[in-house]
Image (spheres, rainbow, N blue to C red):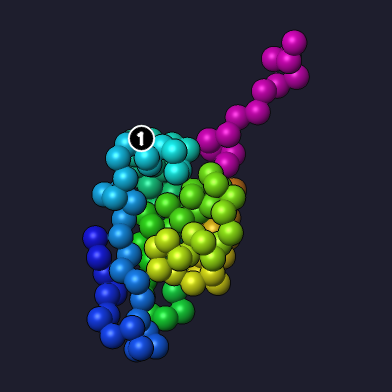
């Protein structure tokens, strides 16, 4: 998937094309980069994707799936946001907003999906 592609790199709105890692990586490469399988990622998209609005100050929307990929890559690798942004053609501030938004969405839904052990379950 290539979107928002402009040939003229001197154009101030020029951006590298966004290429989805889902199509770029094999299953093993995806697991190494994101610490989850493509199947699990699909489930995450179903759980959280509807809660994510498009974020971008340049008029180029970032899909909920791409937002989740960006955040999960950041969580999995701890890379600097500029490096993550360079990989997919987004600015560091955009990456920061996306990671913040995805983190907020996951945190608000955490009680539904994260179950802590009770005291009786400890050895």
Which residue is located at x 75 percent, y 19 percent?
A: 119
In this view, the residue in front, 77 or 56, is 77
**Res 41 quadrant in image:** top left
**Res 9 quadrant in image:** bottom left
Residue 98 shows up from this direction: no
Q: Badge 1 is on which residue?
A: 28
Q: Where is residue 10 in the image (x, y as percent from the top left)?
A: 35, 88
The verdict on residue 57 being magenta is no
Quarter of the image with the C terminus in it: top right
In this view, the residue in front, 102 or 9, is 9
**Res 110 quadrant in image:** top right
Left or right of residue 58: residue 1: left
Say if 11 sits above or below 121 in the image: below
Which residue is located at x 37 percent, y 40 percent?
A: 29
Q: Where is residue 74 in the image (x, y as percent from the top left)?
A: 54, 52
Left or right of residue 20: residue 35: right
Quarter of the image with the N terminus in it: bottom left
Q: Indicate the secondary structure of the residue bearing disc 1.
A: helix
**Residue furthest toward the front?**
9
Q: How many marks do you count on the picture?
A: 1
Magenta residues (range)? 109-123
Residue 41 shows up from this direction: yes
Which residue is located at x 58 percent, y 59 percent?
A: 80
Say if 41 sits above or below 90 in the image: above
């Amino acid at each position: 998937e290539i979107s928002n592609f402009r040939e003229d790199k001197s154009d101030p709105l020029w951006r590298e094309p966004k290429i989805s890692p889902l199509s770029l990586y094999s299953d093993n490469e995806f697991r190494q980069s994101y610490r989850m399988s493509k199947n699990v990622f699909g489930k995450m998209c179903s759980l959280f994707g509807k809660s994510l609005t498009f974020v971008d100050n340049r008029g180029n929307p970032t899909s909920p799936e791409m937002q989740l990929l960006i955040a999960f890559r950041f969580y999995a690798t701890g890379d600097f946001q500029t490096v993550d942004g360079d990989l997919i053609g987004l600015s560091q501030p955009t990456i920061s907003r996306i990671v913040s938004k995805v983190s907020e969405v996951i945190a608000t839904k955490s009680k539904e999906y994260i179950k802590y052990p009770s005291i009786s379950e400890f050895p």
